[in-house]
Image (tube, grey):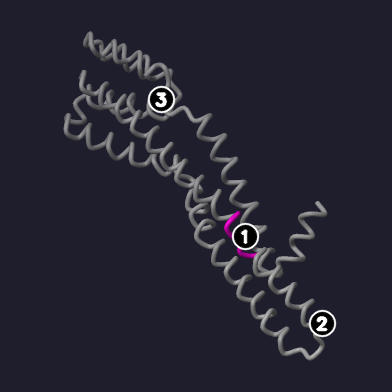
Amino acid sequence: MEGIFELLQKGGLAIYPLFFLSLLSWAVIVERLFSMRASNFTGKAVKDAKALLASKDIDGAIKLLSVDSSPVGNMLKVLIQSYKEGKLTRADLLREVDLELSLMLPKLEKNLALLSTVASTAPLIGLFGTITGLIKVFSAFAIANPEEAMSMLSMGIGEALVAAAVGLAVAIPALLAYWLFKIWGNSIMAKIEEEVFDLLRLL
């Protein structure tokens, strides 16, 4: 803890918002990590329903999907039931599936905008701290007392370097996490789409 407070003192005012952004980004990273690992958009029943649809047992597939609590299972149960009852044509069914799947993507990308904001903002705040530190450096040369000037010079350089380093240290993990979660989410979505459309081809 002493090291953190010492860093806050050395880095100047720019360190405080950077410290807050760091806490925010790591909170989002931990939340996304646990949420995406625990997410279950397709249950086992979705895979088992393929075998029933392959044998043209639509009623059996609907019954199986009705006990599936996953979002995809619930969606397929409602849409296949409507298709069976003639409320939806095949074209309507595919359009509805596309719409429902598009609504799932924001759930996979929840809070990623915060990571993107932190990644783009933190270096600018660090740059602001660097500039204020350099202002102190140049102000030191206007002081007549050489010893005091050297003290202010070292403090200004320290503040400038610390602010820049902390800004990058906050931004880099946020940027990496943003793209990793983006790729992970797209991969999950691609698997969901593959399973759903493989199942619908059997209708």
Q: Which residue is label 3 attached to?
A: 42
Q: Relative to 65, is 5 above or below?
A: below
Q: In the rendering, which numbered label is found on residue 148?
A: 2
Q: Earlier in the sequence, mark 1 or mark 3?
A: 3
Q: Secondary structure at mark 3?
A: loop
> In which quadrant of the rendered view does residue 15 lie?
bottom right
Residue 22 x, y percent position in the rendering: 63, 53
Q: Which residue is label 1 attached to?
A: 165
What secondary structure is the stretch in magenta mostly built from?
A: helix
> In which quadrant of the rendered view does residue 179 lie?
top left
Q: Amino acid at mark 3?
A: Thr
> In which quadrant of the rendered view does residue 143 lie?
bottom right
Side of 169 relative to 113 (left or right): right
Residue 61 x, y percent position in the rendering: 31, 15
Which numbered mark, 1 or 2, is in the foreground of this view?
2
Q: What residue range appears in magenta?
A: 163-169
